[in-house]
Amino acid sequence: MPIEQVIWKVGQKPERLNSSKLDSEKELEEMICNDISILNEQWMLIGRQVMTAYNKSIDLLALDSTGSVIIIELKKYKTPREVVAQALDYASWVQHLDSSAIANVFQKFAHYYLHSTGSLDQAFLEKFGSRLDDNDLNSSHQVVIVSSELDSSSERIVQYLSNSNVPLNVVFFRVFCDGERRYLSRAWFIDPAETQERATSPKISEPWNGEYYVSFGHKMGRDWEDARKYGFISGGGGRWYSKTLSQLKKDDRVWVNIPETGYVGVGVVQEPVVKVDQFLVTTDKGEVPLLEAPINEHYHRKWVDNEDRAEYAVRVKWLKAVPVNKAISEVGFFGNQNTVCKPTTPKWNYTIERLKGVFNIE
């Protein structure tokens, strides 16, 4: 059924705010260009009105921290079905772009809209704190349609495509008025973390080997020595980073990689995920919450009351855990920015077999 967005002004008697539409889709496009975080804080805008080989232009192009390309298409004056079909047509073009073509798209965007001559590599590093890998760039893509509303038929089409593992989503924006003040409200049709998971599913796959991959963001609000000492893995700063931790159950085995560094540990999950302020560790003063223990990082302490942005932790019994300076990194090893995933690529099977030998793990 169509998504409905309603806002009430808090008071003794709640007052429902009047809703309206933006003066134009152009106004919304400008806001997204000025601050793409109104769509997703973990996206970086790289193109605007990008001309395709079919002589049609994509409204916006973005990247996420994995190098996945996001096609953002505003509904504008098109019918709902037209915008869905057009967005999928754009995706058929985007999937064939190589790294040099994407870098060229960014150069044009930087010149006309950012008034900069900086490179895509540098902008990516500044945004995400890690270097862009050519092998990851455009290894997947997803489509996001921006609209104030869709008809029921189009919503069924979007849901069907999503259920068929097509990484397509719709984000709805509405404007609410309180006197002269206007507020922008956002609602996703499908959980964006689910769309992201579909987008990063490998094109060439093998049966999953039962081993979980973990990306640990050392010195990105968390510290590997803390994790080694107290026995945990964690992720936070946004639902995209923390939600995947919920996949882990007791006795699952995890292999931990620090991006740009290497593999540092393998362990067995002891307990399901909990918010970091509820995660207890043993210290000289007894059992205390992790945030009250001697630790080297903040673990997004300032967002502890925000369920979406808070840090979450999973208790792990380490079978092998080495310091950062002894991390294992070799050509051919699997890598991914997802906090937890179940890789089905041949590279993952190779990585596990190699690490079993290095870590002396059965």
Image: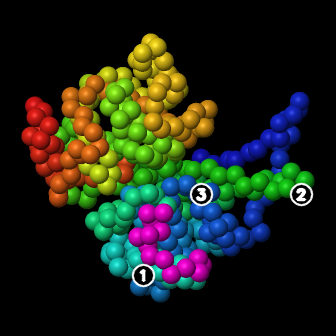
Q: Quadrant of the C terminus?
A: top left
Q: Residue at x 32, y 65 (%)?
A: 133
First along the sequence among labels 2 and 1:
1
Residue tagged 2: 180
Residue 40, above or below 26: above
- Give residue 104's mark: 1
Q: Residues within 10 Å of mark 2 (few under 14, many from 20)?
A: few
**Magenta highlight on residue 35:** no
Q: Residues within 10 Å of mark 3 (few under 14, many from 20)?
A: some
Residue 237, position in %: x, y? Answer: 52, 44
State whether residue 116 appears in this view: yes
Q: Which residues are magenta?
A: 113-126
- Whether the residues at callouts 1 and 3 have beta carbons within 8 Å, the answer is no
Residue tagged 3: 37
Amino acid type at image mark 2: Glu
State whether residue 149 appears in this view: no
Q: Secondary structure at mark 3?
A: helix
How far apart are the two marked residues, 2 and 3, measured between alpha carbons?
24 Å
**Magenta highlight on residue 121:** yes
Q: Residues within 10 Å of mark 1 (few under 14, many from 20)?
A: some
Amino acid type at image mark 3: Ser
Q: Secondary structure at mark 2?
A: loop
Residue 192, above or below 36: above
Q: Is residue 319 left or right of residue 141?
A: left
Q: Residue at x 28, y 65 (%)?
A: 135
Q: Is residue 290 left or right of residue 355?
A: right
Q: Residue at x 55, y 83 (%)?
A: 111
How far apart are the two marked residues, 2 and 1, measured between alpha carbons?
42 Å
Amino acid type at image mark 1: Asn
Q: Residue at x 9, y 40 (%)?
A: 357
